Image: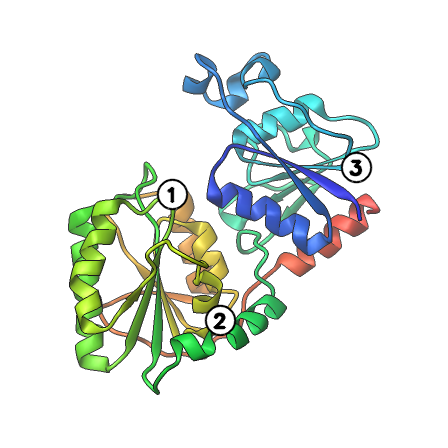
Amino acid sequence: MAKAIILTEDFAGMKSQAFGLAERAGFQKELCSLIPRKPWSFISAPYWPFPLKGVEAFNISESPVVISVGSVGGVINAAIRQSGRAAIHIQNPRISPDKFDLVIVNPHDQLSGKNVIVSRTALHHISSQILSENKGKWTSFFRQDTSPLVAVLIGGNNGRFTLGKSEAEIIAYQLVDLIKTENVHIALTPSRRTGKEAIAVFKQILIPLGAYIWDGEGENPYLGLLACADFILVTIDSVSMISEAVATSAPVMILSLPGKSKRISLFIHSMQQENRVKLFRNRLESWSVSPLDDAEDVVFKVKNILGL
């Protein structure tokens, strides 16, 4: 099995995209976490005059494939690009796509070129097979009665959107209304970016009403929630979480947060155009949906173009 080197900063959303591409393509994964060093950490990576001096020293083993994500990963991948080794970048690198063998972007990246592949959603590892396996594994845990299961995926502060104590209270009381008016079972999982105060609010308000909230102990039920949910609510701050949610067969509704992001707004709009998501309006909506996942098609194109 061929090995792929993953070049990225230590951000969950970036790693999940690179891991997703590598796993779907059948590559072994070797993560090389990049750590920007001062003063270059205060300057956008595409403007670094000597990219390899902009990060802490690192070593990568021999591999036929290097996958980078984000601007830091991109400039490093371009700097170490070698003949005979495929340089693949995920997201708009903010430098010329010609510096890579392939660039994989979403429509909201607004990038095109002869070596650019467009995927409607962020890449991830959640295939139909994985969902099927986890449905069998988690159904007895989450589906203990006939109440509809609402999976709630919570992100956190990211520099563009805010999710603190007050925002958590607003979401929590919206969920309380669903429990009381629509007789649903709420199962909520926070992410690594969810603050402790926000988690405490969710627990205080929702657990007394029978909601399940993952406490971070034991196996993460995230895949089980995606596989078993009748409805999915996900906060607006994460393209990756929304992309994983729309790969399921459940209607997906977006929980708004204070803040703004042009890229995420364009992504949400594209998902609305696909009739795959709707904004949450304090009630559950049911409409005909099918899984939206371009990863297998992307993998086919990558292997075909690069001869892997």
Q: Residues within 10 Å of mark 3 (few under 14, many from 20)?
A: some
Disc 2 secondary structure class: helix
User: On the rendered structure, is 6 left or right of 244?
Assistant: right
Q: Considering the numbered disc 3 on the image, is that residue within a helix, a strand or a loop?
A: loop
Q: Is residue 84 left or right of residue 26?
A: right
Mark 3 or 1, closer to the camera: 3
Above/below status of 54 relative to 5:
above
Find residue 225 and report its horizontal and vertical position in percent.
43, 68
Question: Looking at the picture, how far across and down is residue 193, in whole percent?
Answer: 35, 44
In the rendered image, residue 52, in percent from the top left (x then y), is placed at: 61, 16
| Quarter occupied by residue 170 | bottom left
Residue position for label 2: 227
Mark pair 3, 1: CA separation? 35 Å
Q: Is residue 300 left or right of residue 173?
A: right
Dot placed on the residue nearer the N-terminal end, 3 or 1: 3
Marks 3,2: beta carbons within 8 A: no
Q: Quadrant of residue 84?
A: top right
Query: Residues under labels 1 and 2: Cα distance?
Result: 30 Å
| Location of residue 41 with respect to 86 vertically, above or below | above
Residue at point 82%, 27% (across, down): 83
Q: Secondary structure beneath disc 1?
A: helix
Residue mark closest to the camera, 1 vs 2: 2
Residue most extreme to the bottom? 146
- Sequence-first disc among 1 and 2: 2
Q: Quick one: label 3 or label 2, which is nearer the N terminus?
A: 3
Residue type marked 1: Lys
Amino acid type, callout 3: Pro
Residue ID for mark 1: 262
Give me the C-alpha separation between circle 3 and circle 2: 34 Å
- At 70% from the left and 32% from the top, the residue drawn is 100
Amino acid, disc 2: Ala
> Label 3, on which residue?
64
